Amino acid sequence: MRPVTSATRAPGPFRLTEEQAMLRDAVRVLADEQVAPRAADIDRTGEFPDDLRRLLASHDVLALPFPVEHGGLGGELLTVCLAVEQLSRACATTGLILAVQELGSLPITLAGSPEQQARWFPKLASGEHLIAFALTEAEAGSDVAAARTTARLDADGETYVIDGGKRFISQGSVADLVVVFAVTDPAAPRHRRLSAFVVEIPSDGFAVTRLEHKMGIRGSPTAELAFTNLRVPAANRLGAEGDGWDIAMRTFERSRPAIAAQAVGIAQGALEVATAYARDRTQFGQRIGDFQMVGAMLADMDAATEAARRLLYTACSEIDAGAPDAGRWSAMCKLVAGDTAMRVTTDAVQVLGGYGYIDEFPVERMMRDAKITQLYEGTQQIQRLVIARALLGKSG
Amino acid sequence: MRIVVLTKPVPDPASGGERLGPDGRLDRANSPAVVNGNDEYVLEKALKLIEAAGEGEVILLTMAPATAPETMRKALAMGATRGVLVSDPALAGSDTVATARVLAAALSTLSFDLVFAGVDTSDGTAGVVAPGVAALAGLPFLSYAATIEPDAAAQTVRVRRITADGFEVLEAPMPAIISGTQALGEPRYPSLKGIMAARSKEITTLSLADIGIEPSAVGVDGATTKVTDWRAPAPRGATEVVREAPDEAAKRIVTLLAERRII
Amino acid sequence: MAGIWVHGEIARDGSLTKLSTEAATLARSIAADGAREVTGVVIGAEPAAAAEALAEFVPRVLALTEPMTADHAAGMIVAQRLATLVAERQPDVILIGAGPEGRDLAGALSALTGLGVLANATAVRATSDGPVATHSVFGGKLITESALVSGNGIITVRPNSVTAEPAGTAGSVEVVAAAGDLAQPAVPIVERLPAESKAASIDDARIIVAGGRGVGGPEGFGLISDLAAALGGAVGATRAAVDSGWIPYSQQIGQTGKIVKPQLYLAMGISGAIQHKVGMQTASTIVAVNRDPDAPIADFADMIVIGDLVEVGQALLAELRARSG
């Protein structure tokens, strides 16, 4: 497995380069003009916004995480996160489309052979294909290694047969490729039991058995998958047998920042709505933003969002530069950003008062959207575990 | 067709951080630089022309400090082919005379069909460099262009020049220098692809020695003008914000105009 | 300073431009202390009328006939003729109006003579070391003063910075002949296209009502015109409105349009972005009507009305008509 490091330059830790700023602004314009007007509707109907997915594809946004040689734009982690942040500011579901495209393809980037990358990356980069990441199971959430889905090598030695199921898989029902983690050696030590496979959809034996009704990110389909005698070519296995857990952990190092970016974007969006409201709304003869209690809330929201943002950018720089404690950076930025998003969106509702509770304003949606950033890609408790272990060193 | 576009990095008008240092020169550390707005309009025109022709090159030429490549990034992201930067410590503090000399000398090292420049820059709005370059280079000069139409077969270019009471239609053989206005058309926003592709585009740096200019003729040493003083403009006074309904707002306006004896 | 020259620009109809009368007035005021000569220079195919007019402002005018300017881009041609005169007669300072023609002239003249340029001066005063010019730079954020290192050079004068005042006694016109060839390539004018309409000139209007992108279309400019008429003013526009074809370019105010200094600038649906701001920010009173309280114009207007420009405009029209009627 190859480490993924920054291709051309290590970005400065404190200011975005001209290129990064341009990129952020380009996505922001897209988000403001084309994504924002759809956000309320997406939440109301709970329908996956395929129109916006095609919009992102046509503007090469989905190409950002992929190498240039396969039709991608060769963006670093920071670049991808800048885009996720701007999209999520307008619509958390839409930001997730890019984040999941990155999440799902990371195993292939980290562990796929050149031939496998050449096989799958071009259509992912062009946005023609969507990819999902299927690790979580009903009985294996935080405890990843407790997965029960099995992959048995067939007698011919060229095919695996996968049986089992996955739960809470983002975009599992719209993906063209699904990365499935399954147990190939139940007798192996905990962290060597799993292997990763790319399942091409449609496939016999692959079924979507349920779509969840969720509190937030309602436009992102969250699927329960069932695998019954699902046959997958051995050529679709990523890395060696037993590499699965390691691939997953290494994926999280680079995918968690994207969720942090989503969280920062949600927080920023909420802050902007609350600020505009505090400017316009007058009570007791003055605009409410001039009352200290409201002003203080907004100030704290702004400072917290900025801090989460800066930690995210620094984490991305460190990870892109190949920092050995990438896991700690990744966990930290996701931890801080998720908690910040929850707090900022809750306070945004508070600033708007009664208006914050009704869907005439977007902050109630943003608050519902924010919660997931404390839950998926590792709960906040798991993030704390990772950071504590990095601090203290592993026990035993 | 090869078009050279003269670009100048100027303090970002949106940033508000422009100020002069104790030597009367722009404190560049305090304000981020962007490509001069008018230059983007002529650059856009250049890009459209080579896109329509299906072939050609757009070369950015700028005289600027060594940090300029960052600013050229956006112009490259819009689609320019490559950049040429004339940079030399001796150039710091150059006036318009030196700037025109340097650009004309740099142009003599390039081959081109057309040279485009913005009519002026948002920092000093002098508008004198482009005609100066044309005079030094001995090239036909067509200014204040609202439209630019090259005829590659005839090797001529036709420009609609904005005048006080309409337009003059000018025509000249190529190579020629054209200063262009905002009327040429809104510059494109760089695409993500363009932004990422700009990384691998070439920026060549030329020193004064490369273009045959003596350091003493440029920069502070060669300057014909100097800034002697600066101050913030007198404040206009507070802005009265009126949020009342139209009828009431109209009354407020009339009251103000009457107070100031305008009506 | 021995000789102060001022360039007299010839308008299409052969008359002297207003800007040149402003520059000439400025030339006189610089020369005011001490025995300094002020000379006007008019160069063109038919310079006589403009030269006579300039002679109302300065004691002596040189009139040079150059037929090529009749049907060729004038700037470079005038610059060459002027450069020859400058080399012969060695004036200390040459004032040129900083309109489009003047800037082309000044830039080419500077390159041909090596003389420095103090550009876009809003004021000039004489000192023992030479003239000192005042400028507004960075889109109005800073006022600077600058000088010519050698005390000699070119100064371009921003429109509407000086109030033109005739001298009181008419000066004399001296005919001078062109000498030598024109070495720079001459660019022929193959056609002239007149402006689409003859709207009231905004150059020296006391009141301007201007419309921007917010006006939404040519019909919207009907309201703007009505307001201008009710106030006794002229109609202006931003680049966006002109580009969209809602109003002719002659009414455009801003970086590539005109720079105006009216008593009242009423900005309807104008954001106040820098390219427009530089054209109107020195108006005595600025009133803006805009839906966006965060529009840049809110930073420098005397009053901003947050509202729909049609509703507010119609209410204002009614108020004005009620007052006068």
Image (spheres, coloured by chain):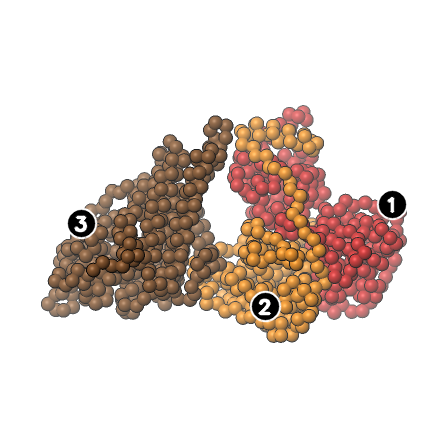
Chain C image colour:
red
Tell me the crowding category of disc 3: few under 14, some 14 to 19, or many 20 or more residues within 10 angstroms, Cα based: few
Q: Nearer the viewer, residue C79 or A85?
A: A85
Residue B20 shows in this picture: yes
Say which residue appears at 69% left-offset and 50% top-offset: B165
Q: Nearer the viewer, residue A195 or C59?
A: A195
Q: How many marks?
A: 3
What amino acid is at disc 2?
Answer: Ser
What amino acid is at disc 3?
Answer: Ala
Chain B image colour:
orange
Residue C323 position, x and y percent, is: 66, 26
Disc 1 on helix, strand or loop? loop
**CA distance separating discs 2 and 3:** 63 Å
Say which mark, if any, is on residue A138: 3
Which residue is the site of mark 2?
B87
Identify the residue at the far left of this view.
A155
Say which residue appears at 63% left-offset and 55% top-offset: B20
What amino acid is at disc 1?
Answer: Gly
Chain A image colour:
brown
Residue C145 position, x and y percent, is: 71, 53
Question: On the rendered structure, is A69 left or right of B45?
Answer: left
Which residue is the site of mark 1?
C168
Disc 3 on helix, strand or loop? loop
Disc 2 on helix, strand or loop? loop
**CA distance separating discs 1 and 3:** 98 Å
Marked residue chain, label 3: A
Are tags 1 and 3 found on a single chain?
Answer: no
Question: On the rendered structure, is C3 left or right of C308?
Answer: right
